[in-house]
Amino acid sequence: MKRLTPPFDTALAVTVLASTVFTVTVAITAANVHAAQQVPADEQQALRARIEQRYDVVPLSGGVALRPKSPRDDVRLIEISDTIAINGVPVSGRELRERVGADADAILRLSYLDAKALGELFGPVAAEREVRPEKEAPLEPAAGRSSRRIHRSGGDRVRIFGDAVVNEGEVVTGQVVAVLGSVRVDGEVGDQVVAVLGSVDLGPHAVVHGDVVTVGGQLRRASGSQINGAVTEVSLGEVGARINAPWLDGWGPVYVFGGFRPVARLVGTTFRFVLLALAGCLALVVARRGVEGSAQRVTDDPVKTTLIGLVAWLLFLPLFVLTAIVLAISLIGIPLLLLLPFAVVVLLLMSVVGFSGTAYAVGQWARRRFGIATTSGFADICLGILIILLPLLVGRVLALGGWTLSPVVFLLVATGLAVEFLAWASGFGAVLTNTFSRWQARRATRSTPPTSAPTP
């Protein structure tokens, strides 16, 4: 038998050693995985208790999600499936330890379990938290679910003076907030959903992992929507203090303070004043001649312009319907039906110009009456609108005092609405009168024959 030379002995020894190390490594890894998936029952309960002490468990397809019970800005949702993701972003073991601290060991132990083991471990919790769509709506075909495109958006989504929308197939990892607007969710939200002075609408595929809060609105849920947090609805119209006393038997509870409804009405009236002031100033810039002409007409004959405006408003709807019917039954007039919306827009613009003229006239009168120095036309319009809306504003303020001032509030509000309506009517009548006068003047000019020059 031939003896191998030293180089061949060394190569053989290295090969045997590498094979041994590889075999031992594979065996240890398999043993670790098997041991991780075959955790004793007492250790499983201890692991589950430790997780449930710090997190709310949310079932996912192929894993679970952990939502911290104590709110944290950096960690809102931890997804455990094939990988570990925090707020929708996969993380390594070191990053996990840096962000969750001592809980990293327990989370890593959960990641060693497969989907079946996780379902068995947190089965009761999943059954409590999961809203099963199959009991409320038919399941979507598997092909439809797999073909839906998922679009993930990191961070929060906030809308002010508008609606916040989460489309179907979209995942927002942060919060969705709408101020003076509503929230529509057809996708998935990783944190809470809040609507201030608006409502929350959840579609059939909506999933909200946090709380849902509506202030001044309501929550509307479709069948199949999921909310894994708490639901809070604050109706501003129903907040108030009530008195139940023996001497009030038969009268029922008496509301001392009507809640936030008077506050909302006062805010709405104030906001309307601001909008009218802006519209009046814009009308003065764009159609200054029309505004000043309407103001002069209202100043000269306010009763006549008001009556003309009232009659025009009363006849507007019947004439509009009659015109539409006549144009519809005539073949030649059918194309003219397309012009009716533009005619309505023109009439609305004329109304704004006329109302601005009325406010301009009222502001000039008040300035002269109280001896205020001459100011710009914009200040006169704002002052006039404030005087027109003053009874309504005072009524809204007195309404904050409660039900004892209800008769006075009703009288002031009714007076304010009547004064504002008359202001709109007088302005519209002034615009119509000026338009008719200009039309008559042009017609008279065209009908008058030109005078011939005298012959020498």
Image (tube, helix red, strand yellow):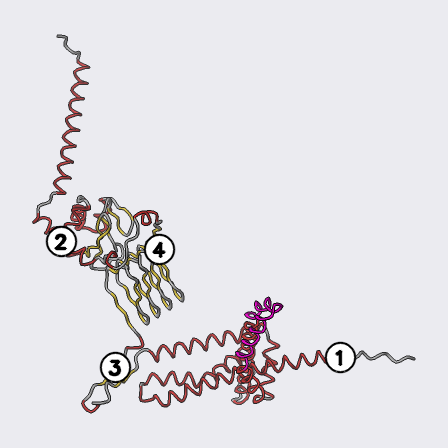
Determine whether, in the image, residue 398 is placed left or right of residue 123. Answer: right
**In this figure, which residue is indicated by the disc labeled 3?**
241
Can residue 267 be seen in the rendering of this structure? yes
Pick out the residue farthest to the right.
Answer: 456
Question: Which badge, 2 or 3, comes first in the chain's sequence?
Answer: 2
Q: Main secondary structure of the magenta part?
A: helix
412 lies above or below 132: below
**In this figure, which residue is indicated by the disc labeled 2?**
50
Locate the C terminus by quadrant. bottom right
* Disc 1 element: helix
Question: Which badge, 2 or 4, comes first in the chain's sequence?
Answer: 2
Question: Which badge, 3 or 1, comes first in the chain's sequence?
Answer: 3
**In this figure, which residue is indicated by the disc labeled 4?**
168
**In this figure, which residue is indicated by the disc labeled 1?**
447
Label 4 – label 3 distance at C-alpha: 42 Å
Question: Which badge, 4 or 3, comes first in the chain's sequence?
Answer: 4
* Disc 3 element: strand
The amino acid sitting under disc 2 is: Arg
Quadrant of residue 133 within the rendered picture: bottom left
Label 4 – label 1 distance at C-alpha: 67 Å
Is there CB contact under 8 Å for labels 4 and 1? no
Q: Magenta stretch: residue 314 in it?
A: no
Pick out the residue farthest to the top.
Answer: 1
